[in-house]
Amino acid sequence: MKTTVVGFPRIGADRELKRITESYLHQESTAEELIQEGRRLRKAHWQLMRNAGIDLIPSNDFSFYDTTLDTAVLLNIIPKRYADLKLSTLDTYFALARGYQGDAGDVTALPMKKWFNTNYHYLVPEFETDTQVKVVGTKIFDEYLEAKTNGIETKPVILGPFTLIKLAAFKGTTYQEHLPQLVAAYQEIIHRLSQQGTQWLQVDEPYLVKDLSEEDRSLFLKIYQNLTNSPRNIKLLLQTYFGDVRDIYEDLLELNIDGIGLDFVEGKHSLELVTASDFPEDKLLFAGVINGKNIWRNDYQKSLILLDKLPPKQFVLSTSCSLLHVPYSVEQESFPAEITKHFSFAKEKLTELKEVAENLDQETEGWGFNQKLFRENRIVEKEALSKQLAALTEKDFQRQPEFRTRNRLQKQTLDLPLLPTTTIGSFPQTREVKSTRARFKKQQINNEDYTAFLKEKIADCVAFQEEIDLDVFVHGEFERNDMVEYFGENLDGFLFSKKAWVQSYGTRCVKPPIIWSDVSRKQSITVKWSTYAQSLTDKPVKGMLTGPVTILNWSFPREDISIKESTLQIALAIQEEVLDLEANGIKIIQIDEAALREKLPLRKSDWYGEYLDWAIPAFRLVHSKVAPQTQIHTHMCYSEFADILPAIDQMDADVISFEASRSNLALLDDLKAQNFQTAVGPGVYDIHSPRIPAVKELETTIETLLEKIPTEKLWINPDCGLKTRGEKETFESLANLTRAAKEIRERLVNETIEN
Ligand code: GLN
Ligand code: ZN
């Protein structure tokens, strides 16, 4: 049996690609040096795969920024404003990716969006009326030949035309206008590759795992019938991932293609689909069995049982998706061997592919080791915790009394003015804050000095909020570098890697913590900071916590228990912290769920059954036990949740703040139409930009908000946390914010008197 991978991480073992790219962008390296390093990395990765015995090795999965952008550039989908800069090909590429400001002009970057249900981001290709789709790039051809020169036959990978259309933006035009050219361009790519002697081409169509409309289906079929109608000298693999292709599977079997790549990890229905009918003899099934998203070892026995059920006798063993979403290699970590043996990053997954393939014929050495690994008890279960979870009843997920009653009580206790002003939590993390924390972590300063430093920062932060007269204060979150890592470090059950970086976008990489075992709270986490801030002022200070769904979504989850169970464990730990804050006199507590929206299942039909049905209760569990007078806030970064508003309301928070500064009036209409009960703080200015909003401008924004939201339900705050901003612009912006709120407040009071 043959093996393949859908794609391999390109950043390198030590994020070399990030380093050289940034160095080039800062004009510290030449284009030639950048290109050389790219070449070196590709070669190293191809050789790694070859040495691991992988049969079909991918090429063109490498990218200096993003493969969707690579495809757009290859096909000349380059908006005029970028082409007009008349930069080199490489610099035009980076202008599309990051924007450009310089002698040649001033353009912003293409928008960036999350790649399906991952934390990777792609650049949104943009078609204009006069976009001429044609093959102008050579990357896919060059990289194939480059590998060939190194003695390695590869399977070039390209983003397919259907997914490209579905993800692209059409400005003043429609996809229909460009379809003939697009199909012709893909035909040409197929033709040129076959002339080069390429044996397989992998065409990625992940959009097929979404709910497909009739229009989607006929568009897809039209494209592929056209694309495959002429004889060709190259095999076509249609690759899907992140789910199953239930809406189109039968049609795929009819197409003139040579391979179908299915995801058997996230594709719940994949097995059912392939076993329901005979698999055509003229096609090869590419079975995505090795998990491309998580970092745990594959359970060989489970894989073999699955593979045994597959109808075709011949298939290619593959990864569930590109290995782009896992870190490079476990070899670079220094966990004890007892722990390391459970992990499999990209490099180790290559061995797994080989071993599973070999084990289909006969038992190999790796088999015994693998079996032992999965039959031994990895985790010492926390008995008390499982009892606690088992004992949870409806009541634990339901805060009492209901919203209206506690709302009244909170009004009395908190005595806040109309349109209360607040921030989302973090204040600027200056170089001083970051370097002091780094020194503390390296034990260059002791706990006492570090605490004193943080207290000083908190005191300054409180004094500033006092000065501009905000209504609800925060302590500033100076102790955290990251809203998930900080809690992970203070909870039992998390592991932190040294180099397990995963590309998030372009040169930005993240290092998600690993949930290793049962999660529980070791000691109080934020209480000392919040209570210290509260001791300095009469204004209420908000406690600041990260919610369980976000902590889970931004970590590598366990596979031996359900995500739901893990989330509930985290929820109980955060609940303890909530109650601890409350017991220590904190009257308002914000529980951030920045990443809740992000992991919505790709199919609408799964939103509730697969996700919201436990994610929302997990959030409620965190705050269900607080007194009616304690006010619970939550925060979400995205405003794109119009379609799940009822679920957001069911979180049963008292107040929710969210990003809204960029044209989000539609959401406000939905809030009104759906009778949204939670009080809301739509961000009144964009914190992603250093720009300082003027008082008048903020007043106008607030007035617009008031047209849609009842006065007693509206809070005034920025979009998100301020940690990436500079101090000066933050202070001025917030001072303007409180002034604007006061102006409007006065106007409202006068109006009431006049009436
Ligand atoms: N409380 C966090 C902060 O202010 C929220 C961050 C976020 O939503 N991403 O930084
Ligand atoms: Zn946010």
Image (cartoon, rainbow, N blue to C red):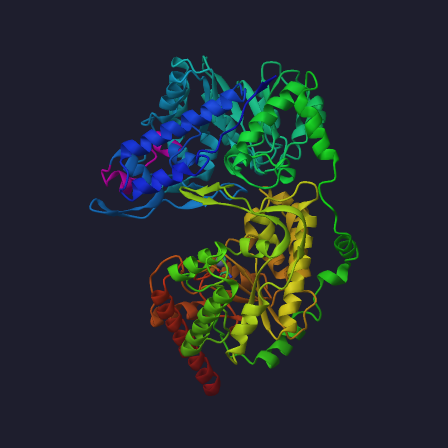
When the figure is inspected, residue 728 is found, relative to residue 552, above or below; the finding is below
Image coordinates for residue 354, horizontal then vertical, percent: 60, 22
> Based on the displayed image, in which of its 4 quarters is residue 662 positioned?
bottom left
- Left of 106 or right of it: where is 665? right
How many numbered marks, from 0 up? 0
Image coordinates for residue 526, horizontal then vertical, percent: 57, 65
Q: Would residue 599 be counted in the magenta stretch?
A: no
Rendered residue at 43%/70% (across/down): 702
Image coordinates for residue 276, horizontal then vertical, percent: 70, 25
Residue interval drawn in magenta: 71-87
- Left of 505 or right of it: where is 92? left
Quadrant location, the N terminus: top right
- Left of 644 or right of it: where is 687? left
> Based on the displayed image, in which of its 4 quarters is residue 654 positioned?
bottom right
Seen from the viewer's position, the closer of residues 93 and 136 is: 93
The answer to whether residue 425 is seen in the rendering is no
When the figure is inspected, residue 389 is found, relative to residue 130, above or below; the finding is below
In the image as oriented, which residue stretches furthest toward the bottom? Answer: 753
Q: Would residue 76 be counted in the magenta stretch?
A: yes
> Based on the displayed image, in which of its 4 quarters is residue 251 positioned?
top right
The answer to whether residue 444 is seen in the rendering is yes
In the image as oriented, which residue stretches furthest toward the left? Answer: 103
Rendered residue at 56%/47% (across/down): 496
When the figure is inspected, residue 482 is found, relative to residue 528, above or below; the finding is above
Rendered residue at 68%/60% (across/down): 621
Image coordinates for residue 233, horizontal then vertical, percent: 45, 12
Seen from the viewer's position, the closer of residues 696 and 130 is: 696
- Left of 575 or right of it: where is 697? left
Seen from the viewer's position, the closer of residues 527 and 678 is: 527
